[in-house]
Image (tube, rainbow, N blue to C red):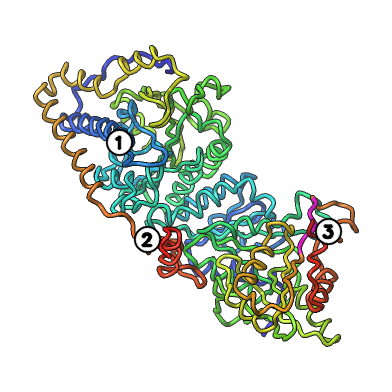
Amino acid sequence: MPIITYRQALNDTLGEELARDPNVLLMGEEIGVFQGSYRITEGLLQEFGPKRVVDTPIAEEGFVGVAIGAAMLGLRPVVEIMTINFILVAIDQVVNHASKIHYMFGGQVRVPLVIRTPSGGTGQLAATHSQSFENWFAYCPGLKVVAPATPYDARGLLRAAVRDDDPVIFIESLALYDTRGDVPDDDDYVVPIGVAEVKRRGEDVTVVAYSRMTAIALQVAQRLENEGISVEVVDLRSLRPLDRPTIIESVKKTGRAVVIAEDWYSYGVTAEIAATIQEQAFDYLDAPVLRVAGLEVPLPYAKELSAVSKPNANSLIYAIHQVLAGSSRGAPWAK
Amino acid sequence: MVKVKEAAPSGLEHENVEDLKHYYYQMLLIRRFEERTSEMYVKAKIGGYCHLNLGEEATIVGLMAALKPEDYIYTNYREHGYIIARGVPPGPVMAELFGKETGVARGRGGSMHLFSREHNFMGGYAIVGGQVPLAVGAAYALRYQGKPGVVVAQMGDGTTNIGAFYESLNLAKLWRCPVLFFIINNGYGMGTSVEMGSSEPDLWKKGASFRVHGERIDGTDVLAVRDAVRRLRERAESEGEPAILDVVSFRFRGHSVIDADRYRDPEKVRAGREHHDPVRNFATLLLDHEIVDEAWLNVTAERVEREVQQAIDFANASPDPRFEDLYENMYATPVPNTPGREDALRAVRINRGEW
């Protein structure tokens, strides 16, 4: 199997979907002439032309709304939002419109729309360009939210998203774009939306993660193996629908769980997962569930301050040791 | 009410008599539908928010008379009359207001969220301005697919102060989308007058920065509305030129059924209803031109009365949506780990205290 980057997996898949279905079109800021802020759409304007690859003005509410309206009439727009921070000016269209239209109008019309956007923060992008808002959308019935961690899943989930008849929020990560992995190039596989995957088998503790945090969890699991700690990594892949059975099955086996996500600690994705484990696997737990998440500040710019405000391998290893020790002191970042 | 130029009654010599009679019938149907809706609201048959088209009948009927079957309509939440004038029978519309399974959105939408795919009536939307980019998107899709037709984005005067409106104007012009921005200018966004809310009260001018043509129209004159929409519709379709129609009408009542309308001078409201009643004025016009007589008006009134009563009877007799269907249509493409009928029934039993 060829080894390619996460970026290449997305770029290839967008090209294939454009070629497969004439109703698929890409929309977004700087995706065409500029070749994409993060080069995800590189070369596609040249290959498919301006009808299929549409450069938009800086008007997220407007063009997300246009994409929804176009989807209602049968087009299948794939919208790029440069980073998830900018989706906030379009949130009315996503939450009040895209997510409601199929259900609220009695199932008469579909909204086959994908919104791709990188979430989270690395590289000193500071407070307004480093946020994680996937939980805002995962909160909303009617949306589907996926967050692949590997090139393989990025390709399979993007295929699923483009071919799905519902609005799908497709969460990417700047820090994952250059990561590499095996991706078959002759197989039209699809990764199903709403299904998690155990990315690594283990016995002692379950780590639940998604997107960039899955990559960190897999590295940590590898490191801890040398210390004789066997870590099972559950990669959520989808945040809505959430594959609760896979999480619960893993925790029932290991009896211990750490949940890690890049968003802020309070009210974040980790809270939902921890609550699920508490409700559905209470009798199986040998220790309280610990959550690892972002420290609750507007992310500072200064390099070291910025780096220590996001969850990382250190915080995950700390939490795993706490859980293995049966600590009930709770997460130190909970205040 | 914003001043519009006093127009003499249109010359009717070129009009089709049956069309004129049909316009009157539709206007009266909307009038009586809305008056009876108000009654049903007071009787608690209808819940939530409920906004009436009283005073807007000529605007609605004029618009629909100019549109073609291939056109699409997106409206705001004051839309009962629009869906009826588009051809949806009053029964399923009233049933939707009653929250019944036979309603146009199967009881999931209610008064503010009417919909009929069959009639290209693409929804009432209750977030001010939300429908405007959607309508541009629908027009974008028509252009993309090379299909005929135009899209109407209906909205109130207050909507012209929200950002989505301006982004939509820009995108519509930039991408040559066949869309008509159809502004119901009744002088008030809830209780805020146009002058209080808009630094440019001539709403038809608001497309100027986007090179979008705009016109003001007397919304109490069904023929004036129809003719303006026809003309601008044609241009939108053939040239991809969007346009603004600033359609002036008089809102007979408060913003919604439960609004006591304290912010308007009662004398002016009385005078407005007196002078700007599009239904009565059109009846007078038809009588003056001897197109109809009193007997026809009476027969039409009886017919409308009967049809609205039948709509109410239909709504009353219709079944409620079933509890087990709560999660139906949550997603168009089924995916794992989503709740179904059994989950709905279990949760509903508990929430109803039946465990």
* Chain of the residue under label 3: A
The residue stretch that appears in magenta: A293-297
A295 drawn magenta: yes
Residue identified by numbered label 3: A309
Q: Give the side of residue A77 with respect to residue B37, left or right.
A: right
Residue depicted at x 40% and y 23%: B248
Number of the label disc, if any, that sits on residue B323: 2
Q: Quick one: B117 or B217, which is closer to the camera?
A: B117
B239, above or below A157, in the image = above
Q: Quick one: B205 or B346, which is closer to the camera?
A: B346
* Chain of the residue under label 2: B
When asked about the image quadrant of residue B58, the answer is: top left
Q: Horizontal and vertical percent for residue A16?
A: 56, 70
Marks 1 and 2 belong to one chain: yes
Residue depicted at x 71% and y 76%: A4
SS for callout 3: loop
Residue depicted at x 34% and y 41%: B46
Give the Cα separation between the discs numbered 1 and 3.
57 Å
The quadrant the C terminus of chain A occupies is bottom right
Badge 1 or badge 2: first in the primary sequence: 1
Number of the label disc, if any, that sits on residue B37: 1
Number of the label disc, if any, that sits on residue A268: none
Q: Looking at numbered disc 2 in the image, what kind of residue is underneath it? A: Phe
Q: Quick one: A63 or A195, which is closer to the camera?
A: A195
Q: Horizontal and vertical percent for residue A26?
A: 57, 58
